């Protein structure tokens, strides 16, 4: 299959390209598209054969359900059995935006989209190209991140092309995404809303709208119960090199990483470093990548996956990363980084 990549300007969306994308989606084909979090791989969510193509393209386990993307609030009743009060409040506050809500599904949503579950995850993305494409494609677009299963989520159209060239007919290139890590997922099927995946919308932000919110205990590294979001049990985003996170005061971290790099280089092991604008000049050796500045969380989150992909292209066999605990999105960033590192942490 030949993959066409079309550049789309989000401030001046080309109607012809949206019609082309919409027609493909209505025929049951796949279209990759930008959202404010990461690039998605879209298919008609109400057509299980179309959804099946997503699993095949990604090599995704079939028990891992897809998020259904909508563009208008009016679209929600058709796919849900009931809309909890909390969902209405959260939608009013955070949609369109990086929040996915799990609710009971209606019969219209095939099990092929929900991985056999009786619930459906729904999100209205805050990206003009995504919204236009969803409307042209019939209003219900199932979309996981547009990466091959196990690779970092794509934050640029070129990342999508690296994984999906020859596999999907169309990639809409809307440039770099803004947030860079996937949406917050909150489950509203129980009494107390539960965060299944941390993201840009934090627990505190949700609590301001709906009161008590809990975090799925299955997300803890040492949890005996599996995470409630089936996708969170897989080791995503694993780079080819061994990744370790070095945690401690900034001074101690820089010193430790430099010592480890020196040891590795003496053994001839090519080593990577993930630092920040505040520290990169202090790493004299190794392949040094800058995540962004600690004064701007979005600069950190938006570079994470791209840097992991860049290291896959390098000769690095081991990577040491600084830790990113602080800030509103700290837990979301660390959740992704810890998974990529297989939870390997060096405390200093
Ligand atoms: O930001 C995002 O959410 C991106 C963009 C494209 O919108 N999408 C995304 O999709 O991250 P994906 O497939 O990579 O991750 C979806 C996660 C998986 O962990 C999956 O298990 C969980 O959502 N999920 C989907 N439906 C669910 C459901 N009914 N109950 C529990 N978890 C669900
Ligand atoms: Mg994903």
Image (spheres, rainbow, N blue to C red):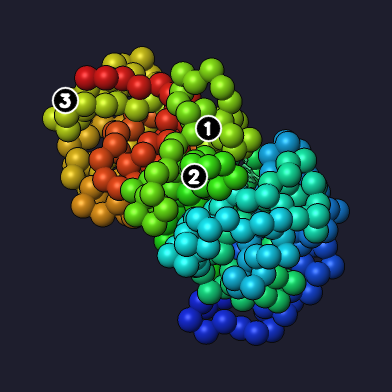
Say left or right for 280 vs 95.
Answer: left
* Closest to the observer, 101 or 260: 101
Snapshot quadrant of residue 249 = top left
Percent x, y for residue 190?
A: 56, 41
Percent x, y for residue 272?
A: 36, 32
Quadrant (top left/top right/bottom left/bottom right) for the N terminus: bottom right
Q: Is residue 43 above or below residue 335?
A: below
Q: Check mark 3 vs ligand 2: CB closer than 8 Å? yes or no.
A: no
Say left or right for 31 vs 132.
Answer: right
Mark 2 and mark 1: span between their CA atoms?
29 Å
The total of numbered circles placed on residues is 3
Disc 3, SS: helix
Decide: marks 2, 1 in contact (CB < 8 A)? no
Q: Are there few (<14), some (14-19), or many (20+) residues within 10 Å of tag 3? A: some
* Closest to the observer, 311 or 338: 338
Disc 2, SS: loop
Q: Check mark 1 vs ligand 2: CB closer than 8 Å? yes or no.
A: no
Of label 2 and label 3, which has the lower sequence position?
2
Mark on residue 238? 1
Say left or right for 207 vs 282.
Answer: right
Residue on which the image places disc 3: 252
Residue on which the image places disc 2: 193
Percent x, y for residue 81?
A: 71, 56
Snapshot quadrant of residue 30 = bottom right
Of label 2 and label 1, which has the lower sequence position?
2
Of label 3 and label 1, which has the lower sequence position?
1
């Amino acid at each position: 299959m030949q993959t066409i990549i079309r550049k789309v300007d989000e401030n001046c969306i080309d109607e012809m390209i949206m019609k082309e994308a919409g027609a493909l989606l209505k025929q049951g084909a796949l279209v990759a598209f930008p959202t404010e979090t990461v690039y998605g791989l879209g298919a008609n969510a109400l057509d299980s054969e179309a959804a099946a193509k997503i699993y095949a393209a990604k090599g995704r386990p079939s028990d891992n359900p897809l998020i259904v993307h909508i563009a208008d609030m009016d679209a929600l009743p058709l796919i849900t059995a009931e809309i909890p009060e909390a969902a209405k409040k959260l939608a009013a506050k955070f949609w369109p935006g990086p929040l996915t809500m799990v609710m009971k599904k209606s019969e219209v949503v095939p099990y092929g989209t929900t991985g056999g579950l009786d619930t459906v995850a729904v999100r209205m993305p805050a990206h003009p190209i995504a919204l236009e494409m969803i409307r042209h494609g019939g209003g219900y677009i199932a979309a996981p991140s547009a990466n091959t299963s196990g690779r970092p989520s794509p934050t640029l159209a070129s990342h999508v092309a690296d994984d999906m060239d020859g596999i999907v007919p169309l990639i809409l290139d809307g440039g770099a995404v803004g947030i860079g890590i996937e949406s917050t997922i909150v489950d509203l099927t129980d009494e107390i809303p539960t965060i299944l995946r941390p993201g840009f919308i934090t627990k505190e932000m949700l609590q301001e709208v709906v009161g008590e919110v809990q975090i799925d205990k299955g997300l803890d590294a040492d949890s005996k119960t599996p995470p409630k979001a089936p996708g969170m049990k897989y080791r995503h985003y694993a780079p080819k090199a061994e990744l370790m996170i070095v945690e401690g005061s900034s001074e101690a971290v820089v010193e430790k990483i430099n010592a480890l790099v020196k040891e590795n280089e003496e053994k001839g092991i090519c080593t990577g470093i993930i630092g920040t604008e505040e520290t990169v000049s202090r790493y004299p050796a190794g392949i040094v990548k800058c995540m962004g500045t600690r004064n701007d969380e979005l600069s950190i989150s938006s570079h994470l996956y791209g840097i992991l992909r860049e290291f896959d292209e390098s000769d690095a066999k081991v990577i040491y990363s600084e830790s990113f605990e602080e800030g509103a999105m700290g837990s979301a960033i660390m959740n992704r980084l810890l998974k990529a590192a297989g939870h390997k942490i060096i405390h200093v």
